[in-house]
Image (cartoon, coloured by chain):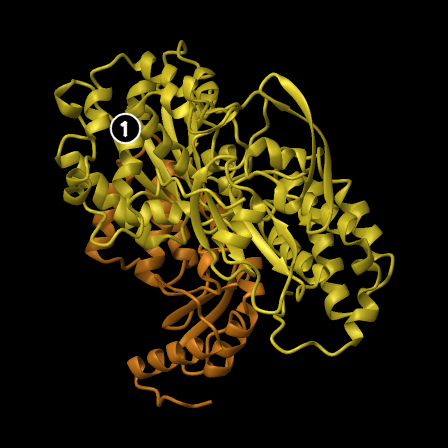
Chain colours: A yellow, B orange
Amino acid sequence: MPAPEQHRLIFRHIDEVGYSNDLACYLANGGYEVLRKAVQRKPEELVDEVKKSGLRGRGGAGFPCGVKWSLLDRKSGKPIYLVVNADESEPGTFKDRYIIHKDPHQLIEGIMITCFANKVERAYIYIRGEFPDGAKILEKAIAEARAAGFAGPNILETGYGCEIYVHRGAGAYICGEETGLIESLEGKRPYPRIKPPYFPAVLGLYQCPTIVNNVETLCHVKHIAGMGGESYSRIGTPGNTGTRILCVSGHVQRPGYYEFEVGKVTMGQLLNEVCGGPLPGRTFKAVIPGGSSAKVLRFGERYKGKRKVGAEMVDFDWGVEDIPMDFDSLALAGSMGGSGGVIVMDDSTSMVEALGNINAFYSHESCGQCTPCREGALWMKKITARMVHGEARPEDGALLKSVADQIAGRTICAFGEACAWPTQSFTAKFGDEFKGYAQAKKAPRPDGVAELV
Amino acid sequence: MNLSAETLRRIDEVITHYPVKRSAALPLLHFVQEDQGHISNEAVEWIAERLGLQPINIYELVTFYPMFRQKPIGRRHIKVCRTLSCAIMGGYRTCSEFQRQFGTGLGEVSPGGEVTVEFVECLASCGTAPVVMIDDELHERVDAAKARALSDRIKSESGIAAGTR
């Protein structure tokens, strides 16, 4: 079956010739019209639209956005904050970069609608430190929006006001975890907070009710407010509504960003048709479907079971190529849609070395608060680095697994799972390669095969 | 502390963005590092004083967040992405090429003080791997040849003879 056409909602103007990131261009393309209409409605109606839309968060967990908003403690009398998670740092993910750099007003319009709907009067955009230009672009866009009455005091003569500030991170991955992000925004080390009691909706920034939403999620809010929740929910598939930006990197002919209705494109269509297939003379070996912490999928393996289609349960029997790219299908295949970062590896890649690379990342980024994660991530890195640069033993795969198995579920935040899943899935699916690595290493390295550790 | 008038103005302004002064710690660290090149002990104490905090409250940030440094670096900062998507497209080769071009090790200041070459984690531009940031500018698809060209440019901008391999 041929791949469907892309459905560019969020990335509609990305790469459009002549489209610039200033306010004049945004207005010429119908910008801020949705906000104009939104501020004439009751805030509660806008929250209902988002609930009806079925929008799920695009940062990684896929939590329903409307539910997140409805959990806000609105009776405390404390101010409510919106924190925009622009700390895009899950390896393999690069969608927010383009929204921020090329279409910042779309994000600001989404932020203002979200703030109005939730009676927020102050929003912070927490942008990763490695986007210095992005921070400047956002600051300029906010100033433009403020001068035109789309942000700041007395928005569009309604009497409602809301300020947006840009806050730069400083290179720590853990700041993408929402409670770590809040700690960081408070000027501290970004140690994630324990839940309960510190659910941001109740005890967030400065112990006030706080919404933390991903950049892409907030852009979707703009389109939901524009077309209505019902219409939006008809895009995509039931339970996985709207569009999704898929970021493809690694060993394919045409890496890049592609926006599809959620669940309408399969992994095979995405990689073989949209991205042009493997590099010349190569075959696909493995793919990580939702950012580097998602469990790896091995080409050739089958996923079987029952899934819900409408009201019925039907059997499914998929290869990697058959998996629809939505949250629920990827979960049925034992992995996750996560942040939409698809990392492809072909048959030139050593899975031991690829895992060594990933382990070095998680070891570097563990915040160190919980012992199983701090020590476990470090030891997984040390073991894979020794396998690559020193002596590899047949039992190392089992040793790695035993370390990983003691991390997940024993930490304050989901980083424990994020660092354990790669090791658990790589050793389970490529166990032979781990057993035989000592032997394989003796062969001369083929030309052009990249070093990974 | 000898901060420029512009840095002092930015500091005064950014503090007003937050209901709690402590929140301005990261912005102040960024501004001071941009002004001074690194964060000295004196800077730690100055920022703490400015925000009504203890020096440890600032020092623990400097030691945690990878972008802050306690020592000066070269005049240009070359940051090569080390993470998976860049690595499988040749990021390690790119990094070695920069090191060879400037005769320097990872994280060191090159002889003559021209550059510091570093590996950093994911720069969120995986679709154009391998990527490199030189100071604040992102460079995409930097293979070894492009690394040589970028190195030549840095050398010519600073007056070092180009083409030393």
Which of B28 and A196 lies nearest the eye of the viewer?
A196
Residue under pointer 1: A112
Q: Position of residue B31 (x, y in %)?
A: 32, 53
* Residue A326, placed above or below residue A52: below
Q: Position of residue A13 (x, y in %)?
A: 28, 45
Q: Residue at point 30% right, 52% down?
A: A15
Q: Position of residue A106 (x, y in %)?
A: 28, 37
Can residue A84 be seen here? yes
Query: For the residue labelled by badge 1, is the local secondary structure a helix, a strand or a loop?
Result: helix
Instruction: Residue lying at the far top in this picture: please name it.
Output: A75
In the rendered image, the quadrant that contains the C terminus of chain A is bottom right
Q: Chain of mark 1?
A: A
Circle 1 crowding by C-alpha within 10 Å: few under 14, some 14–19, many from 20: many
Q: Residue at point 31% right, 41% down?
A: A166
Q: Residue at point 50% right, 73% down?
A: B94
Q: Quadrant of residue B151?
A: bottom left
* Residue A136, placed above or below residue A110: below
In the rendered image, the quadrant that contains the N terminus of chain A is top right
Can residue A91 be seen here? no
Residue A12 horizontal side relative to residue A332, left or right: left
Q: Position of residue A182 (x, y in %)?
A: 46, 33
Which of B80 and B87 lies nearest the eye of the viewer?
B87
Q: Residue at point 18% right, 30% down?
A: A150
Residue A95 horizontal side relative to residue A133, left or right: right
* Residue B152, placed above or below residue A149: below
Q: Amino acid at mark 1?
A: Met
* Residue B147, placed above or below residue A296: below
